[in-house]
């Protein structure tokens, strides 16, 4: 089975409350207007300040590493759980302080006041999606939402109402997104092309992922439009490490972070079969896609684009990925 295997010095800020908080909020509107006109940011060199929320998680760390390699400015603050509040996480030699829910608004307002070109990146947890997005929209800071889950309809509604620029996508892997887009085009243009075919789906992820892959569901929905009858409950989810090694072929070093998918189609008379497969080892494919989304979003903000909400298809279509 083949696989795509992907394996600032800290700054000091004084966070304000009371009169200081009022001063920061009073200046935000002017700073927002100023930030739209700032031309000092060079997207050619990717000199963009970012705040990565969820920096203690595997995806947060992967994004910071990819962003650092691309030359983005990593701010030394991040949102986390109440239990993580006050802790420091070191990634790429940078000390990043984690702030809990009660401090989020002051921290974000301070960062945005200091860095009017700020882009926030969210890789937290599903239960934090809507609350975090509400705050980003309240402060007015552009953001990339890579966290899955939450109330997605409400998420889009809040962002649309706020007019904040955002890239929202549960799948940040550029090549996987391109595959999904191709499947969607095929389903739209050739409905019923696989009518009568049977489908088997196997997906393997790290044991910590308890839910069914959203990517697998998206691909299956395309096959359903192509005429295939399939019950989502019959997806074969592999989470046992021993089965992943022996049956799926996951390299042992990637058991803690991988995404192997197989879709097997068979004709009614069993004389024809098709197989689609995409295997990812590690998290670098998602981290690199996130960096492209950051750079894309910074360009949209700087150009004052009419459209405000984007996804990874928009990033792909823009065509300036690294």
Image (spheres, rainbow, N blue to C red):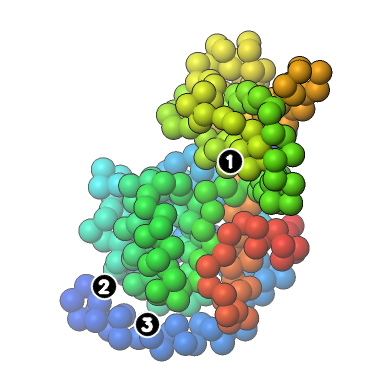
Mark number displayed over residue 221: 1
Residue 73 found in image quarter: bottom right
Residue found at x 37% / y 53%: 151
In three-dimensional space, the C-alpha distance between marks 1 and 3, rounded to whole angstroms, equals: 44 Å
Q: Is residue 191 above or below residue 206?
A: below
Q: Which residue lies most toward the right here?
A: 271
Question: For the residues marked 3 and 2, what is the alpha-carbon distance in whole angstroms?
Answer: 14 Å
Left or right side of 209 for 293: right
- The mark that comes first in sequence, 2 or 1, is 2
Res 137 → quadrant: bottom left
Q: Residue 235 in the image: x percent, y percent?
A: 54, 25
Task: Label 2: state its secondary structure.
Answer: loop
Q: Residues within 10 Å of mark 3 (few under 14, many from 20)?
A: many
Q: Position of residue 115 (x, y in %)?
A: 47, 74
**Nearer to us in this view, 195 or 167:** 195
Which residue has dot 2 on it?
A: 16
* Residue 281, quarter of picture: top right
Q: Residue at x 44, y 71 (%)?
A: 160
């Amino acid at each position: 089975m083949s696989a795509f295997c992907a394996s600032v010095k800290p700054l000091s800020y004084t966070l304000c409350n009371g009169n200081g908080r009022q001063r920061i909020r009073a200046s935000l509107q002017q700073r927002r207007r100023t930030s739209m006109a700032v031309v000092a940011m060079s997207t050619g060199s990717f000199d963009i300040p970012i705040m990565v929320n969820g920096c203690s998680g595997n995806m947060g760390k992967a994004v910071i590493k990819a962003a650092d390699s691309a030359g983005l400015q990593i701010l030394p603050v991040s949102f986390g759980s109440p239990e993580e509040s006050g802790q420091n996480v070191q990634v790429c030699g940078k000390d990043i302080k984690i702030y809990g829910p009660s401090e989020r608004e002051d921290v974000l307002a301070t960062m945005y006041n200091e860095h009017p070109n700020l882009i926030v990146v969210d890789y937290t947890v599903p239960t934090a999606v809507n609350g975090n997005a509400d705050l980003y929209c309240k402060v007015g800071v552009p953001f990339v939402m890579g966290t899955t889950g939450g109330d997605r309809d409400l998420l889009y509604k809040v962002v649309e109402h706020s007019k904040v620029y955002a890239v929202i996508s549960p799948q940040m892997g550029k090549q996987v997104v391109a595959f999904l887009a191709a499947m969607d085009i095929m389903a739209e243009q050739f409905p019923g092309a696989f009518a009568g075919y049977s489908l088997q789906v196997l997906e393997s992820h790290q044991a910590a992922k308890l839910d069914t892959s959203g990517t697998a569901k998206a691909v299956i929905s395309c096959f359903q439009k192509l005429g295939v009858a399939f019950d989502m409950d019959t997806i074969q989810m592999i989470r046992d490490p021993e089965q992943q090694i022996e049956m799926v072929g996951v390299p042992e070093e990637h058991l803690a972070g991988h995404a192997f998918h197989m879709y097997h189609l068979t004709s009614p008379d069993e004389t024809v079969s098709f197989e689609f497969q995409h295997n990812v080892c590690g998290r670098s494919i998602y981290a690199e896609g996130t960096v492209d989304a950051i750079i894309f979003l910074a360009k949209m903000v700087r150009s004052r684009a009419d459209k405000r909400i984007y996804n990874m298809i928009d990033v792909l279509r823009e065509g300036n990925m690294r």
